[in-house]
Amino acid sequence: MTTVTIVIQNAPYKENNKAWHALRFAGAALAEDLRVRVHLLDDGVQVGYRGQQVPEGAANLEALLAELIDCGLEVRACGMALDGCGIEESAMLPGIERGSMKALANWVKDSDHVMVF
């Protein structure tokens, strides 16, 4: 099975929509029966935060990520980034594990494709 690792470094609801596009791609890849893993890094850890304030007219990334996790998406959030953003692990969506650079390196080693958003 082809494995894709996606690294999201951008906070949700920014003008560049990188977090939104990353999750859209993750969903499309899951639909194509790819194994998909997402590593939340830097401000990207905010994508996995419960209770997000969704701007008017924007897609609800919290709901989308929760749905993708239910569909088999593996998600880790960088522990150092969580600490840096002041986010407790308990404030993250269920199914998101605390990750590390070593864990990310292992995913990259095991992946056929790596994408960074």
Image: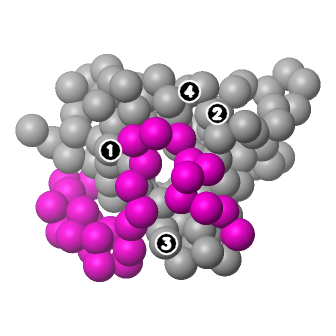
Identify the disc placed on residue 74: 1
Identify the residue position indicated by label 3 in the image: 79
Quadrant in which residue 20 is drawn: top right
Which x, y percent locates residue 87? 66, 63
Element under disc 4: helix
Q: Is residue 24 above or below residue 19?
A: above
| Residue 75 appears in the figure | yes
Which stretch did the figure color magenta?
Answer: 85-113
Viewer-nearest of discs 1 and 3: 3
Mark 4 — residue? 64
Q: Identify the amino acid type marked 2.
A: Leu
Q: Residue furthest left?
A: 1
Q: CA distance from mark 4 to mark 1?
A: 14 Å
Q: Is residue 24 left or right of residue 103?
A: right
Query: Amino acid under label 4?
Result: Leu
Dot label at residue 59: none
Looking at numbered disc 3 in the image, what kind of residue is underneath it? Gly
**Residue marked by disc 2:** 61
Against 112, is 9 above or below? below
Residue 91 placement (x, y as % from top left): 61, 50
Q: Residue furthest front?
A: 90
Q: Residues within 10 Å of mark 4 (few under 14, many from 20)?
A: some
The local secondary structure at tag 2 comes to helix
- Marked residue nearer the N-terminal end (1 or 3): 1
Of the residues under marks 4 and 1, which one precedes in the sequence? 4
Horizontal and vertical percent position of residue 79: 49, 72
